[in-house]
Image (cartoon, coloured by chain):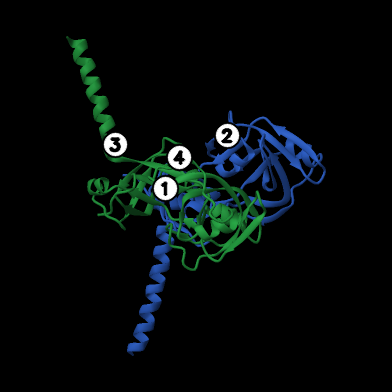
Chain colours: A green, B blue
Amino acid sequence: MLAQANINIEAIVDAVIKELQDQLFIMVEASGRHVHLSREDLNALFGHGYQLTPVKDLSQPGQFACEERVTITGPKNSIQNVVVLGPERSKSQVEVSLTDALVLGIKAPVRLSGDIKDTPGLKITNPKNGVSIEIKEGLIVAKRHVHMTPEDAKRFHVSNGSSVKVKVFGERPMILEDVDVRVDKNFSTAMHIDYDEANACGYTKDTKGMIIVDE
Amino acid sequence: MLAQANINIEAIVDAVIKELQDQLFIMVEASGRHVHLSREDLNALFGHGYQLTPVKDLSQPGQFACEERVTITGPKNSIQNVVVLGPERSKSQVEVSLTDALVLGIKAPVRLSGDIKDTPGLKITNPKNGVSIEIKEGLIVAKRHVHMTPEDAKRFHVSNGSSVKVKVFGERPMILEDVDVRVDKNFSTAMHIDYDEANACGYTKDTKGMIIVDE
């Protein structure tokens, strides 16, 4: 009878812990350098009407990593093998870390994805056919952000455009401040950081974040 | 009369602000990859009795950057032009970022400087004479830490071995947790972070930190 009771209590504790984890923590994902391409730039680099080849779905519904890789080039160096993410966007955008920007030799601003006005351009090359294009703007260091479902936004008492702190439980624990929240019914809840931030917090795939809402 | 009073008030406000800044904030320094060498390893790489050539004093009294550069090599890649810091140490130690460790292809642990037991070794080469040595241990990712004078330790209510949080005021503000405090009368008060952490917080030379002591 007692053994039976113990088993039940353990099962309940496990269920409560899992529920608390789901309620308190969000998934943290580290985004590597990548490129989004417009239809026009896809045509130029890969040929008219070329269709990207999805190889892996990303956490955000509808977003995917492609088989296609490009080389990006700044005044100092090139970085090869940069993954193209789909689907196509209205404007091409290249997202790198500050470490990468230093390698390229370009001063890239920290911006939210999509906010590319007056950002630097750079050269993008398709290594398979040797074709290069110069984009006039679009190089950014992605500002850390949280994608969130409307349900989770309600639960965390935040809304689209909120700024929060996120405590990240890695080997090198830290609290990231000034984290933008983007709420959309098509999102899946996840925090996106870049590889500088990932390395700074000792990121692994199991790293979780806890949202701290400013009073 | 009023103008005179204004000038005095401004001067006082400036002095108060400067004093507050000095009292509340500490200097943050980003440490690039570097190598400390033992006498034995210096002898092997540069020749018996070789004396390092100081080119720049560092913030910590007695520590200096040298003219000498070495190449460090892991199973995946080499990194060239790594600065040697002086003076000699009892054991050689190589400090890199997690980004560098990935380039080298070695899993390097996050450790405080000097704590190198059971850390990985690697190859160090003097590119001028082609001589290489293999160190058996000594590769670390430096754990962030604050060097502090005994006077500042008293002021911040911390002691040698304390762990504090430090709020870093960069373009990408964050609070670094689990920061070790090392107090010594030969230290100058400064926080040391690596380049992953520097990039993650949008570090510039003017970046300051504010110590937050846990209750």
Indicate the quadrant where residue B24 lies. Answer: bottom left
Residue B158 visible: no
Give the x, y percent position of residue A161.
31, 58
Task: Indicate the secondary structure of the residue bearing disc 1.
Answer: strand
Task: State which quadrant residue A155 falls in.
Answer: top left
Q: Earlier in the sequence, mark 1 or mark 3?
A: 3
Q: CA distance from mark 1 to mark 2?
A: 24 Å
Mark 3 falls within which chain? A
Q: Mark 4 highlights which residue?
A: B161
Going by the numbered disc 4, the residue's amino acid type is: Gly
Viewer-side label of 2, 3: 3
Q: Determine the CA span between mark 1 and mark 3.
A: 18 Å
- How far apart marks 2 and 3 lie (CA) works out to 31 Å
| Quadrant where the C terminus of chain B is found in the figure | top left
Could you say which is closer to the camera, residue A139 or residue A102?
Answer: A139
- Residue under disc 1 on the same chain as residue under disc 2: no
Mark 4, secondary structure of its residue? loop
Q: Residue furthest left?
A: A1
- Residue labelled with disc 1: A192
- The lab-note entry on whether marks 2 and 3 share a chain reads no
